[in-house]
Image (cartoon, rainbow, N blue to C red):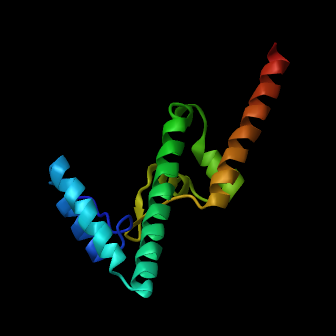
Amino acid sequence: MIDLSKFLPTEDMQADFEKFKSMSPEERVAFQEERACRMDSMSEDERKAFADSTREGLRAIKDELQDVKLALELGDVANAISLSYIAKAYFGKSKNWLYQRLNGNKVNGKPAQFTEEERKRFAEALLDLSKRINETALKFA
């Protein structure tokens, strides 16, 4: 089973999600109405804590989607270029480090992912390589 705790950071959110998955459309409408009433009855501190947890979960979802998008966009280009070279030349890291981030492998129990800065650096590396390949191709034209 997939660990959803980073997307649903509280036990209440996880329990609500598990209930929601098995509900009919009508039950889901009732559940959402009940949840809205629960939100209205929360204290200001409880509401703030809920909003903070929701933001944390949404941030984790956004990060996960960016990593999946990156892997999909790379497609077969990953087979045509040396990811080992990119890891060493542009990051000073091993090829395993780069593969872990591209594939979302678990490192120390958590999925590895690029930071925003690393994601930008990876894009710049690809642009630099494409420029160099283009310049080399022009020499043969």
User: On the rendered image, what quadrant is the C terminus found in?
Assistant: top right
Query: Front-most of 93 and 51?
Result: 51
In what quadrant of the picture does the N terminus appear? bottom left
Q: Residue shown at 46%/46% (left/top)?
A: 68
Left-right relation of 56 to 31:
right
Left or right position of 91 against 131: left
- Residue at 44% across / 58% down in the picture? 61
Q: Which residue corresponds to the image point at 43% horizontal and 81% vertical from the top-left?
A: 49
Residue 74 image-quadrant placement = top right
User: Does residue 136 appear in this view?
Assistant: yes
Q: In this view, does 16 lie to the left or right of 123?
A: left
- Residue 96 screen position, x and y as percent: 50, 55
Quadrant of residue 125 in the image?
A: top right
Q: How many marks?
A: 0
Residue 100 in picture, x, y percent from top left: 47, 55
Up the image or down, 74 lies above or below 41; here it is: above
Where is residue 134? Give x, y as percent: 77, 26
For image coordinates 50% across by 57% down, the residue present is 63
Provide residue 31's location: percent of width, then percent of height: 22, 61
Residue 92 visible in the displayed image: no
